[in-house]
Image (tube, rainbow, N blue to C red):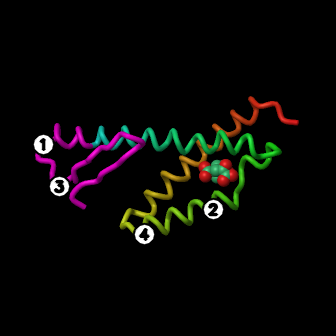
Amino acid sequence: MESLVLSIEDQRVCVRAAKGCETMTELRREIDKLDQFIVEVLKFRLSFMERAAVLKETRNKVRDEDRIEAVVDNIKAKAVAVGLNVEFAETVYRHLIEQSIEHEYGVFDAIEKG
Ligand SMILES: O=C(O)C(=O)C[C@]1(C(=O)O)C=C[C@@H](O)C=C1
């Protein structure tokens, strides 16, 4: 991949491929651009947990083991498809889901149900 074009609403960012970076300064500038995007995607993903906390009727539905395994299986298949290390993808996603569940519990507990 020569470069990655990422867009969020009217924001469009072009991130150069790692092999196109000749210095650490250049390389870190590209990482910073990617991180900005990743943070926005994480925030957007978390907004779905906030909505899930509203849609789930009971607290014991916040953690859904079957769904966790389905998400992880899906991510592992996507990792294979794009050539990303599967163990890396699984580890990152299991952490992400655990943090998402913590956030969802927080929102669920803050809402008055019933
Ligand atoms: O699918 C859900 O029920 C969610 O709340 C989302 C999510 C996730 O992070 O993908 C989070 C908590 C659940 O245990 C399973 C999956």
Question: Is 106 above or below relative to 67?
Answer: above
Q: Which amino acid does label 1 sit on?
A: Thr
The span picked out in magenta is 1-30
The numbered disc on residue 71 is none
| x 50%, y 58%: residue | 90
Question: Is 27 above or below relative to 91?
Answer: above
Residue indicated by mark 2: 69
Question: Is 46 above or below relative to 16?
Answer: above
| x 75%, y 45%: residue | 55
The numbered disc on residue 23 is 1
Label located before the other in sequence (2 or 4): 2
Q: Position of residue 45 (x, y in %)?
A: 54, 45
> Element type at marker 3?
helix
Q: What residue type is labelled 2?
A: Glu
| x 32%, y 43%: residue | 12
Q: Is 39 placed left or right of 68 in the picture? A: left
Residue indicated by mark 4: 80
> Element type at marker 1?
loop
Q: What residue type is labelled 3?
A: Lys
Q: Quadrant location of the N terminus?
A: bottom left
Q: Where is residue 33 in the image (x, y as percent from the top left)?
A: 30, 40
Residue lying at the far right in this picture: please name it. 114
Label located before the other in sequence (2 or 1): 1
102 and 10: which one is in front? 10
Residue indicated by mark 3: 19
Q: How many numbered badges does the structure rendering display? A: 4
| x 69%, y 34%: residue | 107
